[in-house]
Amino acid sequence: MYQTTYHRASSVDEAAALFAKGSEAKYLSGGQTLLPVMKQRLASPSDVIDLAKIKELIGIDASGDTLTIKAATPHYDVATSDAAKKAIPAVAYLASLIGDPAVRYRGTIGGSLANNDPAADYPAATLALGATIKTNKRSIAADDYFKGLFATALEDGEIITAVSFPVPVKAGYAKFPHPASRFALTGVFVAQTKAGDVRVAVTGASQSGVMRVAAIEAALKANWAASAIDSVSIPSSGLLSDLHGSADYRANLIKVMAQRAVTAAG
Amino acid sequence: MSTVKLTVNGKAVSVDVEDRTLLVHLLRDHLNLTGTHVGCDTSQCGACVVHIDGRAVKSCTILAGQADGASVTTIEGLAKGDELHPMQAAFRDNHGLQCGYCTPGMIMSAVDIVQRHGGQLDEATVRHELEGNICRCTGYHNIVKAVLDAAGRMKVAQAAE
């Protein structure tokens, strides 16, 4: 790891001020992605600003029709939260599948969404549920937030403070994990919203990051059943192809995972 | 450089380290607690697992500064004098190690697993929960046996206290 200067911020405002002072600063939350990248010398921030101890960024709140997870809440806390399990069980379940137990104690939802790894889990739930990403400057709709591989609508220095998920009628998540990294080879989140929409988001499969699949949404809107997806055809163009799975394989996984997610949602 | 103050195995310590120092290097190089191992450097193998404020985390994927103020337990802090921790004893009795390189991380993760699941532990759960710890010798079979054995011993020990 290259030299860096570590700062522990005690408030969001202090973190933003420290960021502005650094020449090439980076925010650090759980560090389960940033630190491995720094160890490989693929990133060399002048300053790392630790957000993980900022009290206003930690906690889970379910009230009315919204589940709000503050940005520095670790995956373990989401996975085991009674409030999260009651409001949107599929979100708590998704959190329980991220990485391994040691990673889940450290990694956070804000870090996952700010990094926007194309195979990360949280982007699928965020996009499928039509969540709102709250930052220290504004609120961003999920539909406007994801901009491709590791790219988001966040501006330089902007800090995610919380993510608000509207409670759906039903939702489910199914993931085919890469056996070593536990990232999604393909993960599908399906949701039936209270407004009567069906939204389906896929992670791990597309060359341009998390995406919605209109064909599956239309099929499920007509008939909410795993069998409704049987006749849907998923084109393999634009899908990732690597030694772990070809584009055709991932296209098939999208269907299979979507069916499992619908079954899980009930 | 920064001064990092933390409690390690019940003892308060204060160490001056570069900001880029990882917790595992503070433990090994500054405190000579070499029981915690560095296996992969890519945050996957789990040989470096320690407990920070009671949670089993990878000490190669946390800066020493992030642990400032925390209470850390390493493999050296488990035994009570000459009396092995039930998890250590179970690993020995069940031949849960061969080369021993992954063992400190396995044991620290396993203690956390038992604490979280208590009496609800079965073989499938243990195998699933150990997915962040890699062993290249044993095939995991005796490790899983050891964890299940220790879960029973820890329950008995807890009931006795």
Image (cartoon, coloured by chain):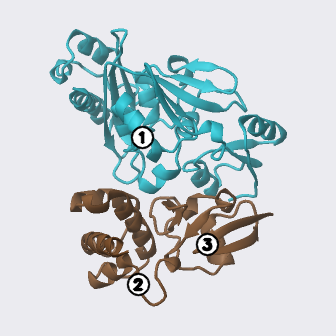
Chain colours: A cyan, B brown
Q: Position of residue A73 (x, y in %)?
A: 54, 41
- Alpha-carbon span between mark 3 and mark 2: 18 Å
Q: Residues within 10 Å of mark 3 (few under 14, many from 20)?
A: many
| Residue B84 image label | 2
Callouts 2 and 1 in the same chain: no
Q: Residues within 10 Å of mark 1 (few under 14, many from 20)?
A: some
Observer-nearest of A235 and A18: A18
Q: Amino acid at mark 3?
A: Val
Quarter holding residue B135: bottom left
Question: Which residue position holds label 3?
Answer: B8
- Say which element carries label 1: loop
Q: Position of residue A18 (x, y in %)?
A: 80, 41
Q: Position of residue A79 (x, y in %)?
A: 40, 42
Observer-nearest of A20 and A170: A170
Q: Which chain is disc 1 placed on?
A: A
- Alpha-carbon span between mark 2 and mark 1: 34 Å
- Say which element carries label 2: loop
Q: Which chain is disc 3 placed on?
A: B
Q: Amino acid at mark 2?
A: Leu
The single residue placed furthest to the right in the displayed view is A21
Q: Is residue A76 above or below residue A129?
A: below
Callouts 1 and 3 in the same chain: no
Q: Is residue A158 above or below residue B43?
A: above
Question: Which residue position holds label 1?
Answer: A81
- Say which element carries label 3: strand
CB atoms of marks 3 and 2 within 8 Å? no
Q: Amino acid at mark 1?
A: Ser
